[in-house]
Image: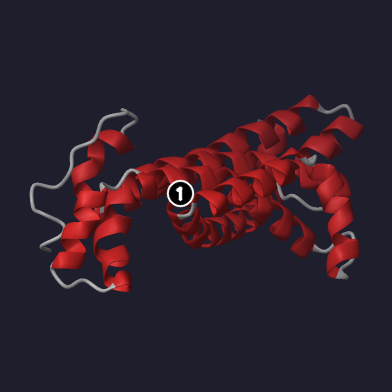
């Protein structure tokens, strides 16, 4: 504890860096997985191809990907862009399956009803399909956020990674207190991300609070989304 208070500025700075380097891939991975998941949910061939590609990418070890990307992107090994791109790929790989399942869970009858009421394809997506797929999407996004925060620590082996620095530095100095602080703050940051997503979900999907609390069942809104 004494080490933490004496190095609080360092720990808080690394925590802020960790949050930034984690948050960007989470948002980018989520945004990119939505159109890919929608396409894959409609076309079986696209589904097979996309899932195969991203499953293969997800099996690539993180450290290897961090070292390979500079040659592909033309960046330096220590460039943080390599970490962001790698974690975005992993986030997309994890989120894609959830996006496919989320969009696939929307009843075709609901979509046909929306079309019959005059919804355009874009309006049907934003006002009908996306809200109904929201619970599944959010549940997967929570998993992605926790995984990304944890996975980022590996980047410390190439001189980046935020709180991962405390692991490598503590290991090199055989200083357990520093390693423990790194673990605790990484867990706290993951819990913070998860809590923020829960709160966002409560605001955007108030009918779905049981899912956000961790149960598998959820309540749909009493009003008809098609007629909203």
Please state if 204 lies on the left or on the right of 226 as rendered: right
Observer-nearest of 161 and 114: 114
Quadrant including the C terminus:
bottom left
Tally the numbered discs: 1
Colouring scheme applied when the structure was drawn? secondary structure
Observer-nearest of 8 and 55: 55
Q: Quadrant of residue 88?
A: bottom right
- Mark 1 nearby-residue class (10 Å; few <14, some 14–19, many ≥20): many
Quadrant including the N terminus:
top right
Please state if 155 lies on the left or on the right of 42 as rendered: right
The residue sitting at 67% across, 41% down in the picture is 55
Across and down, in percent, residue 160 comes to 79, 53
Across and down, in percent, residue 216 comes to 32, 28
Across and down, in percent, residue 189 comes to 55, 43
Residue 194 higher or lower than 19, as above or below: above
Can residue 26 be seen here?
yes
Observer-nearest of 13 and 155: 155
Please state if 69 lies on the left or on the right of 42 as rendered: right
Across and down, in percent, residue 96 comes to 53, 48
The residue sitting at 59% across, 60% down in the picture is 24
Q: Secondary structure at mark 1?
A: helix
Please state if 98 lies on the left or on the right of 87 as rendered: left
Residue 123 higher or lower than 83, as above or below: below
The residue sitting at 34% across, 53% down in the picture is 200
Which residue is labeled 1 in the image? Answer: 99
Residue 76 higher or lower than 130, as above or below: below
The residue sitting at 55% across, 61% down in the picture is 32
Q: Quadrant of residue 64?
A: top right
Can residue 8 be seen here?
no
């Amino acid at each position: 504890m004494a080490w933490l208070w004496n190095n609080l500025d360092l720990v808080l700075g690394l925590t802020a860096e960790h949050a930034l380097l984690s948050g960007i891939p989470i948002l980018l991975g989520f945004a990119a997985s939505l159109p890919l998941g929608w396409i894959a949910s409609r076309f079986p061939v696209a589904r097979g191809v996309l899932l195969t590609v991203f499953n293969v990418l997800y099996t690539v070890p993180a450290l290897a990907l961090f070292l390979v990307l500079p040659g592909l992107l033309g960046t330096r090994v220590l460039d943080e862009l390599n970490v962001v791109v790698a974690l975005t790929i992993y986030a997309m790989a994890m989120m894609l399956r959830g996006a496919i399942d989320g969009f696939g869970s929307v009843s075709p009858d609901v979509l046909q009803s929306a079309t019959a009421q005059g919804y355009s394809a874009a309006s049907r997506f934003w006002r009908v399909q996306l809200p109904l797929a929201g619970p599944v999407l959010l549940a997967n996004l929570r998993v992605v956020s926790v995984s990304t925060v944890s996975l980022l620590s590996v980047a410390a082996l190439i001189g980046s990674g935020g709180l991962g620095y405390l692991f490598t530095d503590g290991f090199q100095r055989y200083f357990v207190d520093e390693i423990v602080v790194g673990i605790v703050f990484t867990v706290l940051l993951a819990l913070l991300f998860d809590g923020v997503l829960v709160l966002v979900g409560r605001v955007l999907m108030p009918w779905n609070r049981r899912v956000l609390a961790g149960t598998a069942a959820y309540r749909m809104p009493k009003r008809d989304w098609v007629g909203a």
